[in-house]
Image (cartoon, rainbow, N blue to C red):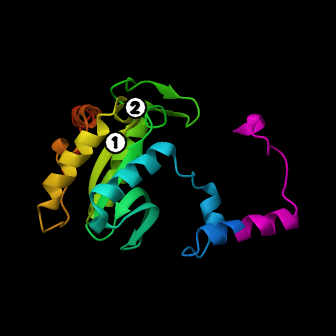
Amino acid sequence: MGENNPMFSKTLSEDQKKKQQETLLKNHPDVSNAFGLAVRRTKTRPQLAIFEYLSKIHPNFDFQIEKRITMKGKEIYADIVSFRKKIVIEFNGDYWHCNPATYKSDFFHHVKKLSASDIWAMDEKRLETITSLGYRIIVIWEREFRSGEWKDTLHRWLEKNAKEDNFDVIRPSVNNYSSADVKLGELLESRGTDTTA
């Protein structure tokens, strides 16, 4: 970011812009505004590993990675999504999302210029938006990914939900989340934030 970015204060030539647009359209043919994807992060290694694992254990769910969900005038990108089963898997980096297992609520994120509690509130709003669109969510934290716990957690969650024929709009219970998400829920409840809506 800023001066550390090799492109800081540089502009692209028209040829460079054209080449960039061609590459974006080639990689994302189903998106009308490929330049809009330029501000999106690329797929991370953990996302790819989770996606590959999901595709092997549940190929019939048709999981897709970094896809846009658009419904009822709302638009949100999901890390991994099954449109068929209305499931979203979110991968949260410990630092970027201030994992409650590691960070206190008053921690100030110098890049985002927000406190951890503000970041958690934004993440909770995001989860609410996704569930309002009829999706069930499981959040995998970087800490879980690094320890290897994520496969067991994910497998149990998917097996439980795969047995249900109905994926109607419901608010995921804390049982669908990791221990860090439970701590986040408890924190939001203590602040008077409605987590059951």
* Magenta extent: 1-22
Quadrant for the C terminus, please. bottom left
Q: Position of residue 153 (x, y in %)?
A: 23, 41
Which amino acid lies under the numbered mark 2 shown in the image of this protein?
Arg
Tell me the quarter of the picture where residue 165 sits. Answer: bottom left
Residue 122 visible to the viewer: no
| Image coords of residue 136 (percent x, y) | 25, 58
Would residue 118 be counted in the magenta stretch?
Answer: no
Q: CA distance from mark 2 to mark 1?
A: 10 Å
> With respect to residue 70, does 78 lie above or below?
above
- Which label's residue is closer to the chain start, 2 or 1? 1
Q: Residue at x 29, y 71 (%)?
A: 84
Q: Secondary structure at mark 1?
A: strand
Q: Is residue 61 above or below residue 101?
A: below
Residue 4 covered by magenta stretch:
yes
* Residue ID for mark 1: 140
For the point 23% across and 47% down, the residue is 155
Q: Is residue 182 left or right of residue 108?
A: left
Q: Where is residue 163 shown, x and y percent of the image?
A: 11, 61
In this view, the residue in front, 133 or 94, is 94
Q: Quadrant of the N terminus?
A: top right
